[in-house]
Image (cartoon, grey):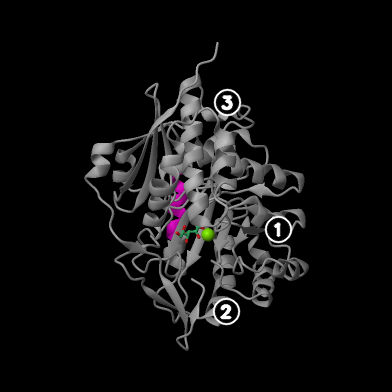
């Protein structure tokens, strides 16, 4: 006998326990609640409005068990489809519905996705240092915490502020408080002169085993990217990320002809359609799409399946702006997906761990989603309410002559 439950409530929470998060809570007539993550760094309220004003009325009365049908309904029903705001909103609904399905069946989501194909998920974290000694120290601290994969970002001589690095050597958080963005100055020549030396020195220092990653954050031309890739080959990187701006994907053909450095791209992509050229032409080694920004578990699974056909592996985005709910969803998918390679794990401030009680765990360089039914992340709503939204923005960047460039 089957009974049909219905969605009775859809609530959106915007909370700032040290940084902003947008959360979706779906409640059913049977009293089951599911959580989704709708955080889009620096554009939080746009997604909150999309959910509250446009999707919530459509969800009331629907059968929460129909996860794929709801995805299709919201995606195809949008007409003005795709884009980060729409796909993050749909992603939040999808994650919340998988959470509900897990809770109603008593299963962790990875079991519903076919069960574990690995015992644990390799994680990489961020090391940051303004100069080489500081960066080496930061890497050693992460190694002592068990990490076997570390992203290394360095300061650049002559520049005041650089993506991924804080001058004080403390943790780096890209979003700045306030309604207007911080302005950074960027000099590609200085970066290209400096960074191959830094990463090669790091490799000499850490030895062959530690997996080293580096993020160029969309800043180079194809020619510059090809040169950088070649110069970095002795550093034996696990991956070089986002070498060029994501809009123009054909340029990857040029870069691929000149370097064998493994390439990772895709944190700003929202659908499989943006990934398909890079995957089917094998222009990248890792696809970085994120479970919350790319339409949820249902859609990221589709991207993973396409990537698997072309020996491209998944290395999803997971900085501090991906809440513990989305991280949990990513880990369930990761445990059940053969071509999942690595999960970014920047970590969270202690208060975030208090607001989000999570079944996922980190140990010895690896993550595991846990065995709680659903996604396994619950929110302390009272504590969240004590930390209301605070306007925050991502920085912008100008070249030395004052003209705008990509941040
Ligand atoms: C990464 C990313 C982030 C982004 C951030 C923007 O690889 O972790 O590039 O650091 O800059 O998610 O909101
Ligand atoms: Mg990145």
Q: Seen from this angle, which residue lies furthest left? A: 386
- Say which label, 3 or 1, has the lower sequence index: 3
* 151 shown above or below 249: above
Which residue in the protein does label 3 denote?
111
- Disc 3 crowd rating (10 Å Cα; few below 14, some 14-19, many 20+) is some
Q: Nearer the viewer, mark 2 or mark 1?
A: 1
* 195 shown above or below 59: below
Query: Which residues lie in the magenta part?
Result: 137-145
Q: In the drawing, does residue 322 fall left or right of residue 255? A: left
When asked about the image quadrant of residue 239, the answer is: bottom right
Which residue in the protein does label 1 denote?
278
Instruction: From the top left corner, tell me how far across and down residue 167 is, in percent.
Output: 36, 69
Query: Could you give the CA–CA distance between mark 3 and mark 2, rounded to whole angstroms?
Result: 48 Å
Mark 3 in CB contact with mark 1 (< 8 angstroms):
no
Which residue in the protein does label 2 denote?
193
The answer to if 407 sits in the magenta stretch is no
Which residue is depicted at the point 29% across and 45% down? 351
- Disc 1 crowd rating (10 Å Cα; few below 14, some 14-19, many 20+) is many
* 366 shown above or below 258: above
Which residue is depicted at the point 40% across and 21% down? 30
* 60 shown above or below 181: above
Counting labels gives 3
Instruction: From the top left corner, tell me how far across and down residue 403 is, in percent.
Output: 48, 84
Mark 3 in CB contact with mark 2 (< 8 angstroms):
no
Q: Does the residue labelled 1 lie within 8 Å of ligand 2?
A: no
When asked about the image quadrant of residue 214, the answer is: bottom right
In the image, 11 versus 330, the foreground residue is 11
Mark 2 in CB contact with mark 1 (< 8 angstroms):
no
Instruction: From the top left corner, tell me how far across and down residue 323 is, in percent.
Output: 41, 46
């Amino acid at each position: 006998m089957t009974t049909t439950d219905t969605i009775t409530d859809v609530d959106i929470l915007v909370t700032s326990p040290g940084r902003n998060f947008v959360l979706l809570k779906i409640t059913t007539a049977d009293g089951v609640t599911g959580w989704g993550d709708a955080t889009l760094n620096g554009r939080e309220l746009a997604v909150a409005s999309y959910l509250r004003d446009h999707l919530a009325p459509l969800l009331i009365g629907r059968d929460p068990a129909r996860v794929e049908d709801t995805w299709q309904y919201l995606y195809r029903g949008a007409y003005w489809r795709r884009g980060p705001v729409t796909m993050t909103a749909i992603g939040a609904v999808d994650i919340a519905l998988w959470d509900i399905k897990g809770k109603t069946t008593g299963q962790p989501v990875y079991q519903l996705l076919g069960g574990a194909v690995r015992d644990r998920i390799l994680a990489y974290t961020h090391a940051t240092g303004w100069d080489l000694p500081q960066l080496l120290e930061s890497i050693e601290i992460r190694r002592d915490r068990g990490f076997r994969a570390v992203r290394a970002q360095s300061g650049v001589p002559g520049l005041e502020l650089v993506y991924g690095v804080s001058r004080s050597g403390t943790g780096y958080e890209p979003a700045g408080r306030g309604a207007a963005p911080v302005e950074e100055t960027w000099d590609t020549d200085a970066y290209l002169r400096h960074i191959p030396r830094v990463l090669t020195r790091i490799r000499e220092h850490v030895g062959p085993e530690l997996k080293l990653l580096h993020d160029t954050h969309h800043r180079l031309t194809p020619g510059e990217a090809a040169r950088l890739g070649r110069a970095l080959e002795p550093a034996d990187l696990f991956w070089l990320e986002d070498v060029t701006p994501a809009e123009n994907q054909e340029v990857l053909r040029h870069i691929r002809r000149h370097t064998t450095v493994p390439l990772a791209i895709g944190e700003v992509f929202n659908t499989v359609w943006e990934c398909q050229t890079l995957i089917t032409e094998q222009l990248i080694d890792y696809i970085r799409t994120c479970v919350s920004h790319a339409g949820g578990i249902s859609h990221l699974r589709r991207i993973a399946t396409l990537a698997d056909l072309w020996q491209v592996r998944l290395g999803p985005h997971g900085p501090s702006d991906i809440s513990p709910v989305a991280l949990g969803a990513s880990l369930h998918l990761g445990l059940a997906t053969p071509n999942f390679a690595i999960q970014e794990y920047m970590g969270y401030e202690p208060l975030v761990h208090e607001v989000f009680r999570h079944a996922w765990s980190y140990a010895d360089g690896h993550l595991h989603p846990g065995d709680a039914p659903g996604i396994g992340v619950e929110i302390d709503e009272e504590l969240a309410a004590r930390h209301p939204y605070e306007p925050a923005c991502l920085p912008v960047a100008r070249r030395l002559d004052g003209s705008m460039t990509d941040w």
